[in-house]
Amino acid sequence: MYQIDDFEYIYILTLLPLIWICFGLLLRWKKKVQMSFSRPELLEILSPNRSKFKPIFKLIVLSVSLFLLVIALMNPKIGTQLETVKREGVDIVFAIDVSKSMLAEDIAPNRIEKSKRLVSAILNQLASDRVGIIAYAAQAVPQLPITTDYGSAKMFLQGLNTNMLSSQGTALDSAIDLSGTFFDDKDQTNRVIFLISDGEDHSEEAFNAASRAAELGIKIFTFGVGTEKGAPIPLKRNGIVESYKKDFNGEVVITKLNKDILETIAQATGGVYQNGNNTKEVLDFVSEQLKAMDKKEFEAKKFVSYKDRFQAFLIAALLFLLIDLFLFETKTKWVQKLNLFNEEAN
């Protein structure tokens, strides 16, 4: 089996017919000029060492050299062996809080941006695990189904914002239940939800949802983003803070990290709560947890390993160029004696 890396270089070969046409026109012009100068018999006497075959032979050598050089530029590859690659990992669903409370700036630049950067950093260190993404506020909506395409995951991740859901709040139960539907492989022993939130839940169903997830063999790891001291929720226009969110009494709302509910959810499924404010600590924690889990083989592919073979064509092209360089258009004496090209001495 073989393949070509840069097939577009083949168009350079269109120069070969052009070169031969120009050569033919040049020979015709030379002959016409010579005929106007003298008869062919006299020209043979005046230039006895002039070869009739050498110019054509030099052109053939040059054409072969150009052909080989183009083949080298195309970089042909030949398959050497059939290799099988197995991918093992766990299924991970990222449930990301996009409620208005995530706009609080007690963590720079704000909670939502911190959460997105945290998930992106985790994706960067994953190798063969499958990932999915959901966003939630008062309700949860799917963003990316389970996949190994980390590029797509990052693209969908960047599109998350606090304006994507009209209904506000933090329904952790909805996020957990929807995440549970993402796991499409019944044989997968390790199903993981990474739930990123400030923990401001406005329902009482989070623990029950966590219990349902535990029955399905799902383990939830929660990451708290924000501080227990809290911060107001800025209302911005064109990047400028105009005011802060207020309650019905006109008081500025202070949103705080509620790690207790996040710890309760994690413990209900055998998972662990981790403070999400320190990215390095989170990455070390995730790496440690994933290494301890059994990996399932969910993908095995066979492919041919190709090796470059342009070197031989390049060396051959340079060799023919050297031959053309040292090949003169006069008759060669020892070849003349052999009379290989019917170049009889006068």
Image (cartoon, rainbow, N blue to C red):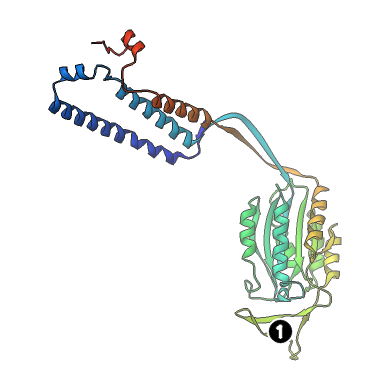
Element assignment for label 1: loop
Residue in view at x 50 percent, y 28 percent: 315
Position of residue 336 relative to residue 227, above or below, is above
Q: Nearer the viewer, residue 160 or 4?
A: 4
- Where residue 169 sits, quadrant-wise, is bottom right
Give the image location of residue 137, x and y in percent: 70, 71
Q: What residue appears at the point 72 percent right and 51 percent down from the top-left corner?
A: 126
Q: Is residue 294 left or right of residue 51?
A: right
Compare residues 86 and 218 and report the one nearer the observer. 86
Viewer can see residue 97:
no
Task: Please state which amino acid type lies under the numbered disc 1.
Answer: Lys
- What residue sits 69% from the left and 59% below the top? 120
- The one nearer the camera, 338 or 201, is 338
Q: Position of residue 168 (x, y in %)?
A: 69, 76
Residue 239 seen in the current view: yes
Say which quarter of the image contains residue 198: bottom right
Residue found at the very far top of the displayed protein: 338
| Image vertical order of residue 326 relative to residue 92, above or below | above
Is the residue 346 above or below the residue 85 in the image? above
The residue where tag 1 is placed is: 245
**Side of 172 relative to 48 (left or right):** right
Q: Position of residue 147 (x, y in %)?
A: 65, 52
Q: Nearer the viewer, residue 158 or 38?
A: 38
Q: Residue furthest bottom?
A: 249
Residue neighbourhood size for the residue with mark 1, other residues' Cα within 10 Å, grouped as few (<14), some (14–19), many (≥20): some
Which corner quadrant holds the C terminus?
A: top left
Q: Left or right of 307: which side holds 184?
A: right
